[in-house]
Image (cartoon, helix red, strand yellow):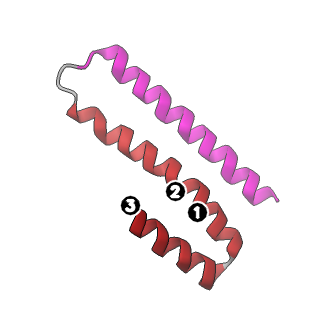
Amino acid sequence: MAGSYLLIFCFLLFTISPHWAQIFSVTYPFLAYIYFIWKANRFFKSRNRKQYNLSLIVICLLFILLLVIVFQFLRN
């Protein structure tokens, strides 16, 4: 994950623009958290419905926060 982060960040920084590199550097960890929480749900064999719902709520909150951050970047 760190390798792909560094490669994509450097690519955006030097070829596209520092603004897009900055957006990527903020959004990539949020997307990684969302992905890892989603994938980790299938490894719990004895989970109950409450734990599953809580993980979905956390995913939704992270996604909303991600959208707010992206819109703030694009607005400026």
Location of residue 21 (image quadrant): bottom right
Residue 24: x, y in percent?
58, 63
46 in relation to 65, above or below: above
Residue 57: x, y in percent?
48, 26
- Dot 3 crowding, Cα within 10 Å, few <14, some 14–19, many 20+: few
Name which residue lies at 35% across and 19% down.
51
Q: Secondary structure at mark 1?
A: helix
How far apart are the alpha carbons under marks 1 and 3? 14 Å
Q: Which residue is mark 1?
A: 24
56 in relation to 14, above or below: above
Q: Which residue is mark 2?
A: 28
Name which residue lies at 67% across and 53% down.
70
35 in relation to 11, above or below: above
State the mark number for residue 1.
3
Magenta region, residue range: 47-76
Magenta stretch holds residue 61: yes
The mark lying in front, picked from 1 and 3, is 3
How far apart are the alpha carbons under marks 2 and 1? 6 Å
- Dot 2 crowding, Cα within 10 Å, few <14, some 14–19, many 20+: some
State the mark number for residue 53.
none
Q: Is the C-beta separation of discs 2 and 1 under 8 Å?
A: yes
